[in-house]
Image (cartoon, grey):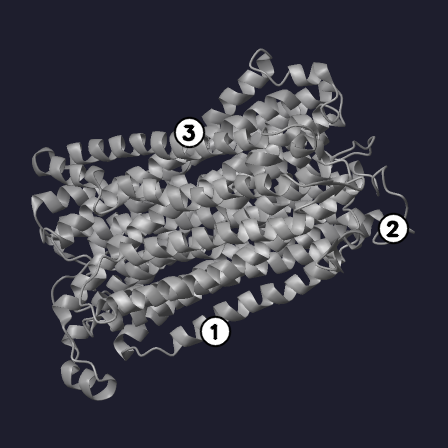
Amino acid sequence: MLKRLTRNQGIVAVLAVVAAMLACPAAAWASEDQLILPDLHSQTFFGINGHTLLTIGLAIAALGIVFGLVIYAQLKKLPVHRAMLEVSDLIYETCKTYLLNQGRFILILWVCIAAVMVGYFGFLRSGQSANASGPAEVGLHEYSKAVQVIIILAFSLVGIAGSYSVAWFGMRVNTFANSRTAFAALAGKARPVYSIPLRSGMSIGMVLISVELIIMLFILLFVPRNLAGPCFIGFAIGESLGAAALRVAGGIFTKIADIGADLMKIVFKIKEDDARNPGVIADCVGDNAGDSVGPTADGFETYGVTGVALITFILLAVPQAEVQVQLLVWIFVMRLIMVITSGLSYFISEGISARLYANAKSMNFEAPLTLLVWVASITSIVGTYVVSYFMIGNIQVLGVPHYDLWWKLATIITCGTLAGAIIPEVTKIFTSTQSRHVREVVTTSREGGASLNILSGLAAGDFSAYWVGGVTIGGLMALAYGISTIGSGESNLASIMIPQTTAIFAFGLVAFGFLGMGPVTIAVDSYGPVTDNAQSVYELSLIEEQPNIRTELSRQFGVNPDFEHAKSLLEENDGAGNTFKATAKPVLIGTAVVGATTLIFSIIMLLTGGLQNKDAIAKLSILHAPFLVGFIEGIAVIYWFSGASIQAVITGAYRAVEFIKRHIRLEGTEKASMEDSKRVVAICTRYAQAGMFNIFLTIFFITLAAAFADEYLFIGYLIGIAFSGLFQAIFMANAGGAWDNAKKIVETELGAKGTALHDATVVGDTVGDPFKDTSSVAMNPIIKFATLFGLLAVELALTLDRTKRAALAGVFFLIAAFFIYRSFYGMRIVDTKAEEPATQPRESAYAAK
């Protein structure tokens, strides 16, 4: 393992040197990173200037962090039995080791990105934009080129640190909420089993969004205006790298462990989280690595990159500085208000839920989560219209007020906010335990076994891609575009920006609206890993077998335990967690695609001279062969990525299953040895990092190759990645969700564990695992990383003549091809004896049989 990592580090170092050599002094291009932020002091809102207003906003964001930390402290004080606490602490310590390893791994990958950033910002980019009025103007400062590069690199590290730190926080909250949830089930009441995971999720969501806002506001307010643009881009690239690494590696890790643990139920006919199975601890760690660490980092990056895309768009497409200030301040105040409305929505929905379910012994766990989402959507929409009316009710353009634009902008954002509530509802049609599609998976499994189970899940995924991606997301984008075209003269959006850009701005605002209830979206996504782990903690604690447990629970906690009902509550709640994990995925991937569209516009502005070059514009068409070829290649990359990420799961799961079968002991022991459990975790970590390494470097070099081959091919490549990624991700995520909850129906509603029907649904679930939690979810950061990195890559390419570009494109493609080759042939299953230690393996029940 160490030898392999050392070799990989050497490869990265060599490739970073190659990337750094690309940069050479050249004529500066007027690009998005050179645009200077307008002076926020120049416009007033509510009697105070924009800079001061957003400075006050820092305090609101800080209160959001306090909100999250208070919930964190409250959760930590909840009662829990020592046996359950020991299990959750073990999961946390193992997660911590994994995350520390991932942190070092991300820094290795950062070397590649840093090399290109040094080349771009150190050699290609001039010190200031041509439209800067000079260092004497307020907010503009001259720095040496070296200092500028250091500052930009520092913000890329801030981006990585942001993704990494919120991921760590999410993992820490979830790994003690799991044991508290498991313990709460013993009392036999349903509401605490629901409220603890939700409180955990709200803590994560509020901290995540608030930290993001503080960092972005700091750049906007305190970084010199001529350097803020590059710092935003550096920050976005850093958080995108961190999210991509944690999402991909976490997704591979969790599904290796999940499949390894699940298949033992079929092989040995043991229960879900049998403590004798050495794969269960790895599965619990994976629930956090894949379903907590990855999504939290992803949510942080999604929120930040969408903001950077809108900032970039406003600076490029809006010619008047006064309008730029009004729109920028409005956007950030909207974000602050949405933090407030999310917190308010939580208290409103929890107040209603407390009255409805206070003493309920059972409940539909999906109902209060659905209520929260809709309350958050409604309050966000109300906040959107109120804030828009008072802030931009009369947008000033050269002193002339525009009175009809505020409601159009607010309505376009509302299209995105509604998407954040409608998409989960449509997704539940294909993934909920109440869904006809999911029940069809169960029905077909009765007679058709695993074969028809899998086919039914595939069909559900295909249908969902049409309804979620085509009808819902596409329909809301079309509605937003229609609103942007209403009116003429001063009542039309074209009156404040370049006319051809209004549709792109509408799409960017839709992406902004997707995240209008960001803390709530993160909360319902984080609900799943807690409910999943709570089941495992209950079983692994062997709580029912503790000496004098009923007396102890009654005396120490005042609890009269109902063990069977507790297990039933935890299993049903896990089904709700599965559903809402599924509902958050299309929201994030939809945001990625719509946000990427806004970023791609930045490159188009560069290539077309601000949409003035008609010949260049004509090449952005399928009639221009390079553009069409790039589009096809972008689609191809999505399918390669799906295969590469699943291949890493296949190989890792094979190794994990092989190890578990040979070392599991079902006789004479209550728990698997810690040594064996750690070995399974090591297997998962090894293949997660190996898979991530191949995937990241392929994306890095294939993006460089496309950018250097032809700039219009590159635009097509990015569009192909974005839109094929949208439908592939929705298809895979919802097919996986259908398989997962079909198994849950068999286990809870039908009580058919250990039957042939259960075996069929377990097989389907193991197919769905990498679909929904590895490949689909990681497309979001992959799309945005390729697009953000493309902002730099294509401009590097434009500094060189065609011959040099073609040669470098060929070199980059060959390097990418090497890692594409490695993603299968370097990961495929080979002779098992080469992987086993020299010592004789212990006898196992499987070997004996």
In front: 158, or 285? 158
Local packing at callout 2 (Cα closer than 10 Å; few below 14, some 14-19, many 20+) is some
* Amino acid type, label 2: Glu
Disc 3: which residue = 639
Using the image, tell me which numbered label, if any, was put on residue 70. 1
* Amino acid type, label 3: Tyr
Marks 1, 3: nearer the viewer = 1
**First reached walking from the N terminus: tag 1 or tag 3:** 1
Asked which quadrant contains residue 461, the reply is top left
- Residue at image coords 83%, 47%: 145
Tell me if residue 654 can be seen: yes
Marks 3, 2: nearer the viewer = 2
Per the model, the C-alpha gap separating discs 1 and 2 is: 43 Å
Q: Position of residue 758 (x, y in %)?
A: 13, 46
**First reached walking from the N terminus: tag 1 or tag 2:** 1
In front: 175, or 50? 50
Q: Position of residue 779 (x, y in %)?
A: 46, 39
Under tag 1, what secondary structure? helix
Tell me if residue 839 can be seen: no
Disc 2: which residue = 142
Please indicate whether residue 553 sits to the left or right of residue 11 in the image.
left
- Residue at image coords 68%, 53%: 155
Per the model, the C-alpha gap separating discs 3 and 2 is: 46 Å
70 shown above or below 311? below
Per the model, the C-alpha gap separating discs 1 and 3 is: 44 Å
- Residue at image coords 67%, 30%: 494
Q: Position of residue 205 (x, y in %)?
A: 47, 59
